[in-house]
Amino acid sequence: MSTPAARVSRTAPLAQDPHRTPDARPQDVPDRADAAPDDFEAQYIPTLVDLWDQLIDWDRRRASEQDFFVELLNGAEARRVLDVAAGTGYHSVTLAQQGFDVTAADGSAQMIERTRRNAERHGQSFTVLQADWRSLRRHIDGRYDAIVCLGSSFPHLFQEADRRAVLSEFYEALNPGGILIVDHRNFDAIRRHRYRSTGNYYYCGTGATVTVAHVDEELCRFRYDFQDGGTHHLEVYPVLAAELSSLLIDSGFDTIQTFGDFQEDFDINEVDFVIHVARKP
Ligand code: SAM
């Protein structure tokens, strides 16, 4: 089990060309066996949680997403929506403001507490609970019309068995006809050493820069540099778009639609984020 300290380190800039991602492991990166990258809770240390809203910038994010998720949910006639990776609550609050019956869940106690506070600050009231996806159904009440897992959260699952088990949990938590919306950074491009982040999608804050410190087929390590000089890292599994589509089909979902940066017609080399919309028959 890693200690939070293992997650925060100061490193010299690694990539000279912002689009070229390094393939060599920097010296200060903790050994993966020690770092336990799939210990997602340890990655969201209080100082990073404190900076999260600065990183995503709610206003800029809203301007960039516009009604993309609302339209998908309305298209599926969804009313009861479960946000399984609520983080600081951006989507839960936004969807509650749009009239959806929202439940916000997250496995991190730090993050979910932030959702609670942000909901209150925005005058929204909905159920907020701490739940690891791997035991999701133990925490929730009944089924949902839609599940959203956004902000490149799903790649926190490093084991294929976990990815399959979690998709199965999500599937079972949906009503027939319900949809799962799950996204991730464009690891197809990142794994080809073409990291591209316009800063226009999801992580829209202007007070931080995000670079790839390391990538291989099993691990992607992002480095977040904040204006105050603070540096944080997040480690995730670099899932490919086709890999996730195929897992969704294996899990029983039937229609899978894929979007790149909110567009149905997109070039996989050119987008920052990939979004999958999967329907339960
Ligand atoms: N959706 C938010 C956003 O877009 O701002 C937060 C995204 S953040 C990258 C990923 C979130 O997923 C974190 O809040 C983390 O605690 C949560 N998470 C990761 N693995 C999880 C798991 N196995 N169960 C529950 N939550 C998990």
Image (cartoon, helix red, strand yellow):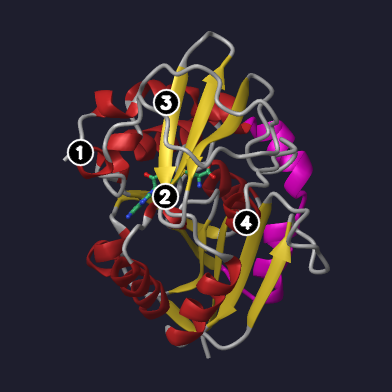
Label 4 sits on what residue type? Gly
Measure how far apart labels 2 and 1 are at the Cα level.
Answer: 14 Å
> Which of the marked residues, 3 or 2, is nearer the chain's N terminus?
3
Evaluate if marks 3 and 2 touch, with contact meaning CB atoms under 8 Å apart: no
Label 2 sits on what residue type? Leu
What residue is drawn where x is 66% and y is 27%? 205
For the residue labelled by badge 2, is the local secondary structure a helix, a strand or a loop? loop
> Which of the marked residues, 3 or 1, is nearer the chain's N terminus?
1
What residue is drawn where x is 69% and y is 23%? 206
For the record, the magenta segment spans 57-79
Q: Nearer the viewer, residue 167 or 17?
A: 17
Measure how far apart labels 4 and 3 are at the Cα level.
Answer: 30 Å
Q: Position of residue 251 (x, y in %)?
A: 42, 83
Evaluate if marks 2 and 4 touch, with contact meaning CB atoms under 8 Å apart: no
> Which of the marked residues, 2 or 1, is nearer the chain's N terminus?
1
Q: Which residue is mark 4?
A: 99
For the residue labelled by badge 1, is the local secondary structure a helix, a strand or a loop? helix
Q: In this rendering, which labeled residue sits more in front, label 1 or label 4?
A: 1
Q: Position of residue 8 (x, y in %)?
A: 35, 23
Label 3 sits on what residue type? Leu
Task: Tell me the tag on residue 34.
Answer: 1
Packing grade of label 4 (10 A; few <14, some 14-19, many >=20) is: few
Measure how far apart labels 1 and 4 are at the Cα level.
Answer: 45 Å
Measure how far apart labels 3 and 1 are at the Cα level.
Answer: 20 Å
Q: In this rendering, which labeled residue sits more in front, label 4 or label 3?
A: 3
Q: Which residue is mark 2?
A: 219
